[in-house]
Image: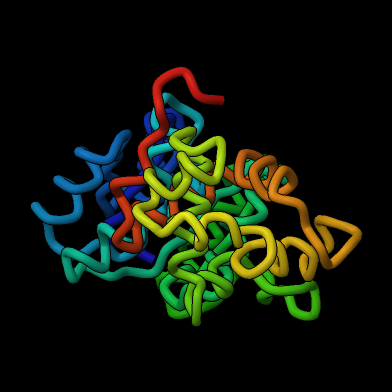
Amino acid sequence: MDGLRILVASPLGSIIEPALAARFPAGTVTVARDRDEVERAVRGRLRHDVVVSDLMWNSAAEFTFDGLDVLEVLRGADRLAPVVMATQGHGMEADHLEEVLVRPEVRGVLRKSDGPQVLFDAIVEVAGGGLVRPPAASGTGPTIHGWFAHGRGRTAARMAGAIASGRATSHATLAEAANVRYDTAAKIGREYLGELIWLRGEHTEAAVPASVVYRWCGEHARYLLSWCRRNGHADVADRVVGHR
């Protein structure tokens, strides 16, 4: 397939750029290594035929930008294109991957360890309208993004983001950081996140203590902060300096 306009959104995109240029000599390859470069590449050019993006960014931006943010940049600029998402293949990506697999613009998902030829083949396939990705998981309990999308989910997400960012370590600080009532913060285990954690099999009992919820938010911080900054809760999505 000749003349493809390919955008590579990755802090290490310069590594694969020469191989892509050699494989698609009649096309153009643009590398964007951070949010600003992605914004410029998307808004300042013609629509790309294929976007290749890292799912998780192995850089200082790992808590502030990821492949799901790349999708939002494309959507916000009205420059949607078929996306190939490149994964590391480790468990830390599971929350992100659950959402990726229901995003219609993501036409390909592959592991970086599969090598460049698999990437080349995926680019050709999705550029031609094909699909190169596993199906979305089913029957494994609710997804985080699905839980946040309904009912009390947005409040649950906001409180989860406040905890994940390091702003909240108690019900009192949670109420202040998330701008909710104290009695709402005190129900985070019973009514807002506890059931999600239990249904996902991440706690053995339906009654989930607040201490487990706070720890869970830390373990899922990368995705929780990603969801919040992409869904109108950017004020709780930036980590407090020094928080781990």
Residue 70 in sight: no
Q: Nearer the viewer, residue 197 or 185?
A: 185
Q: Is residue 50 above or below residue 146?
A: above
Residue 149 rendering spot, x and y as whole percentages: 48, 76
What residue sits 39% from the left and 31% below the top? Answer: 61
Q: Quadrant of residue 142?
A: bottom right
What residue sits 30% from the left and 39% below the top? Answer: 31
Q: Nearer the viewer, residue 17 or 31?
A: 31
Residue at the extreme top? 242
What residue sits 55% from the left and 60% below the top? Answer: 121
The number of discs equals 0
Residue 240 rendering spot, x and y as whole percentages: 40, 28
Q: Nearer the viewer, residue 100 or 148?
A: 148
Residue 55 rendering spot, x and y as whole percentages: 51, 49
Quadrant showing the C terminus: top right
Q: Quadrant of residue 138?
A: bottom right
Residue at the extreme left? 44
Q: Is residue 218 above or below residue 178?
A: above
Residue at the extreme right? 204
Residue 44 in sight: yes
Residue at the extreme front? 183
What residue sits 43% from the left and 46% below the top? Answer: 66
Residue 213 rendering spot, x and y as whole percentages: 68, 50
Q: How is the image coloured?
A: rainbow
Q: Is residue 158 left or right of residue 217?
A: left
Q: Is residue 168 left or right of residue 211?
A: left
Q: Quadrant of residue 98?
A: bottom right
Quadrant showing the N terminus: bottom left
Q: Nearer the viewer, residue 9 or 154?
A: 154
